[in-house]
Image (tube, rainbow, N blue to C red):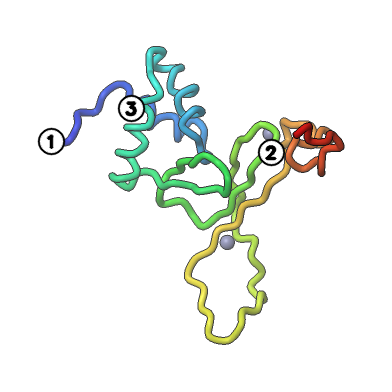
């Protein structure tokens, strides 16, 4: 297939990652890109994100139990912070892994990913998110 011409939609989607330099989910990309292209649809966003991953402009950020986020390639080694309240993912600068961490003999690390979770400065830490509140006292009616 011939390489697709740069459409207005695609440019708007690319710009989002400069506007908001942190890992973004498709819904966030849609929201932000709609500032430029109000009629943008989610299918176009998914297609553009997939294309950009194939073109190695973006990489997929996998978070356990979460929808995939996307970030620009070529960033320095860093870690992620997931806010459990607003569901945003942020970059943390530098490496959190202690260099004196001892591995069993014979193991060699070539890569690692660390995701911290909690609340971001915009969210209220006193209200705990649903899923860490412990077992519900309500009994199952079945
Ligand atoms: Zn937050
Ligand atoms: Zn690290």
Residue at the location (60% across, 52% down)? Answer: 93
**Which residue is the site of mark 3?**
11
Residue at the location (34% across, 39% down)? Answer: 50
Q: Is mark 2 within 8 Å of ligand 1?
A: yes
User: Which label was assigned to residue 2?
Assistant: 1
Choose mark 3 or mark 1, whichever is in front.
1
Determine whether, in the image, residue 64 is placed left or right of residue 61: right
Mark before the other along the chain sequence, 1 or 2: 1
**Which residue is the site of mark 2?**
84
Alpha carbon separation for disc pair 3 and 2 = 30 Å
Mark before the other along the chain sequence, 3 or 2: 3
Q: Of residues 140 and 22, which is closer to you in this image?
A: 140
Residue at the location (58% across, 45% down)? Answer: 65
Q: Secondary structure at mark 3?
A: helix
Q: Position of residue 120 (x, y in %)?
A: 71, 38
Callout 1 crowding tier (Cα within 10 Å): few <14, some 14–19, many ≥20? few
Q: Residue furthest bottom?
A: 105
Say which quadrant the C terminus sits in: top right
Say which quadrant the N terminus sits in: top left
Q: Of residues 36 and 103, which is closer to you in this image?
A: 103
């Amino acid at each position: 297939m011939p390489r697709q011409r740069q459409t207005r939609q695609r440019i708007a989607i690319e710009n989002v990652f400069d506007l908001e330099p942190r890992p973004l989910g498709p819904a966030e990309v849609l929201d932000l890109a709609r500032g430029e292209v109000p009629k943008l649809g989610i299918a176009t966003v998914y297609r553009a994100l997939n294309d950009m991953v194939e073109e190695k402009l973006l990489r997929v950020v996998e978070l356990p139990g979460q929808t995939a986020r996307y970030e620009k390639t070529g960033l320095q080694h860093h870690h992620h912070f997931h806010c459990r309240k607003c569901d945003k993912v942020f970059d943390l600068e530098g490496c959190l892994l202690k260099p004196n961490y001892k591995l069993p003999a014979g193991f060699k690390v070539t890569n690692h990913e660390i995701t911290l979770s909690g609340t971001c400065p915009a969210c209220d830490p006193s209200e705990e998110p649903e899923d860490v509140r412990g077992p519900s006292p309500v009994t199952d009616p079945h």
